[in-house]
Image (cartoon, rainbow, N blue to C red):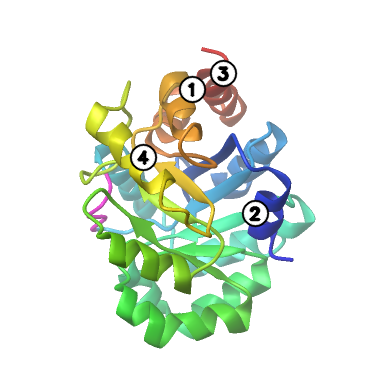
Amino acid sequence: MNRIDKLFAEKQQGIISVYFTAGYPCADDTVPVIRELAGQGVDMIEVGIPFSDPMADGPVIQQSGTVALNNGMSLKKLFGQLKDIRSRVDIPLVMMGYLNPIMQYGPERFCRDCFECGIDGVIIPDLPFADYMSQYKDLGEEYGLKFIMLITPETSEERIRLIDQNTSGFIYMVSTASTTGAKDSFSEDTLEYFRKINGMGLRNPRLIGFGISNRPTFVAACGNANGAIIGSEFIRLLGREPSIAEAVNKLMGKLLKE
């Protein structure tokens, strides 16, 4: 069973998925960050592929990508870092990145290398759904990869149901139509959007991302989906705290104790 499916079969609520940029803050931090997150109880990890034009990302993630690229991070280097990762952690790992670097690397080569490293899923925010259906769906099935699609408050009900019917793993619910970034709370409009999706009876589990930074936003997300994705807040902590362990500890405290 794919590790993503196994996670959602065993845990239906309160799932914590954490995004970080590979190669940030230092080039060789990718595996230590993964190990520390897994060791402190995170349920799933999204490994970000740095890109020079991350259009959906806010300033915190953009800056981390710039640092990682300056550190020499590339897809080839990232796969090299992850080649033995399954001897160290067994929670689901998802690769998240934009289409351009993946196209340059080669889509089939990318999927094959994900499979060989033990990656369970892929999120490509700018992958058109039609291209997924025609070019990537079969690759995902061949290499055992879940292609996770994003929905936003602007996504039509028809498109949401099309995504739900043609993907598996989970649906990434973007909390806002704006870029990534931490928020202290969600607006009533956002909560209404959560309730609308929650009432659609979708077959896939859902995680809410963009704006999760503290206990109130985490609780609100978990009340309307299976869990939450945290990115900007963790990257901010990685850049500020004296060690990876302290950054992860602070994050878990913010989500579970504040």
Task: Check residue 189 in the rendering and tell me which mark sits there, or answer none.
Answer: none
Q: Position of residue 223 (x, y in %)?
A: 49, 31
Closer to us: mark 2 or mark 4?
4
Pointer 2 and pointer 4: residues touching (CB < 8 Å)?
no
CA distance for labels 3 and 4: 25 Å
Closer to us: mark 2 or mark 1?
2
Amino acid at dot 3? Gly
- Which label's residue is closer to the chain start, 2 or 1? 2
Residue position for label 1: 241
**Which element carries disc 4, helix, strand or loop?**
helix
CA distance for labels 3 and 1: 14 Å
Task: Check residue 194 in the rendering and tell me which mark sits there, or answer none.
Answer: 4
Q: Mark 4, residues whose alpha carbon is within 10 Å: few (<14), some, or many (≥20)?
A: many
Pointer 4 and pointer 1: residues touching (CB < 8 Å)?
no
CA distance for labels 4 and 1: 33 Å
Closer to us: mark 4 or mark 1?
4
Q: Is residue 56 magenta?
A: yes
Name the side, left or right, on which 63 lies relative to 202. left
Q: Which residues are magenta?
A: 53-57
State whether the magenta stretch is mostly helix, strand or loop: loop
Closer to us: mark 3 or mark 1?
3
Residue position for label 2: 92
Location of residue 127 with respect to 196 vertically, above or below: below
- Which label's residue is closer to the chain start, 3 or 2? 2
